[in-house]
Amino acid sequence: MEKIRTDNSPLVSPLVILDRVEKNYFDGEQKNTIYHELTAQFLRSERVALFGRSGCGKTTLLNLLSGIDLPDSGSITVNGHDITAMNETQRTLFRRDHIGFIFQFFNLVPTLSVLENILLPLELANKKNQQGKEYALSLLDEVSLSHRLDSYPENLSGGEQQRIAIVRALIHEPVLILADEPTGNLDAETSEKILALLDSMLNKTKATLIVVTHSKETASITDRVLTIKNGKLCTV
C-alpha cells in the first residue's frame, strides 16, 4: 500500500521528531500504556497515513503532535520547537501559527459565515487583515466556492463544508496539517473530489500531512502508510 509521490518534491529534513515518547492512561488503578519509547520522524512536505484498529492510539498521536496532550515522558519537536517543553499557553499559540486541522465532522462554527470561518485562524492569531482576506477569497475561488462566502455551514453540503474546512486549515500557511478521518463522513464520489482537492493544495503549499484514516483511497495520496500496533508505528 505504500506509495511515493512522483512530483519530485524534496523530502529532506524532519519536520516532526518523536524521541522516546511514552503515553499512559489509567482505568481506575489499572495502568494502560498507549505508547512506550516511541521514536519516529516525519519529513518536511511528506504525507503519512496512519492506520490502526479502534482504540490503538491514532487520535492520541494527533493530540500529542499538536500539543493538545502531552506525553508522560520523551520529547516531541515540531519545526525545530520542542512542544513538550512549552507551557499550555505557548503550545496554544504554537498551534495557531504552525498547525492546521481537518476533521471528519468539519467543525465549522455554525454562527459564522463561510468567510468568517476561514478567517478565524487569522483572527485568533491577530493576523486578520486585508491581505489575509484577499488570500481567503483566492482560496475560495480555487475550491469553487466563492459564491458561498456569505453562506452559513447549515446551508452547505458535506462536501462543501469539507472544502471550507480544508481552506480554513491552510489559510495561515501552516507547516503541518493534521487530519482525522477527513473523508469519513462523505460518500465515495464526494470523498474522491475532496482527496483530489487536498492533493492539489498540498502540492502547492508543501505542508506536511499526517492523516488518520481507514480508507485506502485516502492513503493513495500519501508517501507512507503506517499502522499503529502495540504502541509502535509499523510500515505496511
Image (cartoon, rainbow, N blue to C red):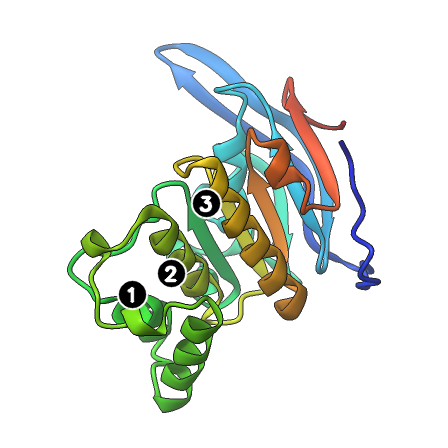
- State the mark number for residue 155: none
Question: Is residue 138 rendered to the left or right of residue 147?
Answer: right
Specify the label residue 164 is tagged with: 2
Residue projecting furthest to the front: 189
**In the shown orientation, is residue 208 left or right of residue 166?**
right
The outermost residue toward the left is 111
- The percent position of residue 85, horizontal first and vertical second, equals 54, 53
Residue visible at 47% across and 14% down in the picture: 31
The amino acid type, in three-letter code, at marker 2 is Ile
Instruction: Inspect this view and state whether residue 180 appears.
Output: no
User: Residue tagged by mark 1?
Assistant: 117
Left or right of 212 on screen, residue 3 = right
Q: CA distance from mark 2 to mark 3?
A: 14 Å
The answer to whether the residues at label 1 and label 2 have Cβ atoms under 8 Å apart is: yes
Q: Nearer the viewer, mark 2 or mark 3?
A: 3
Q: Position of residue 203 (x, y in %)?
A: 67, 64
Q: Earlier in the sequence, mark 2 or mark 3?
A: 2
Where disc 1 sits, the SS reads: helix
The answer for how far apart the CA atoms under marks 1 and 2 are is: 8 Å
Q: Is the C terminus in the top left, top right, bottom left or bottom right quadrant?
A: top right
Q: Of callouts 1 and 2, which one flags the residue occurring earlier in the amino acid sequence?
A: 1
Residue at 45% from the left image edge and 79% from the top image edge: 138
Q: Is residue 134 above or below residue 51?
A: below
Three-letter amino acid code of the residue under disc 3: Thr
**Residue 93: x %, y % from top left:** 42, 65
| Residue 9, picture quadrant | bottom right
| Three-letter code, disc 1 | Asn
**Could you say which is closer to the camera, residue 148 or residue 37?**
148
On residue 190, the disc is: 3
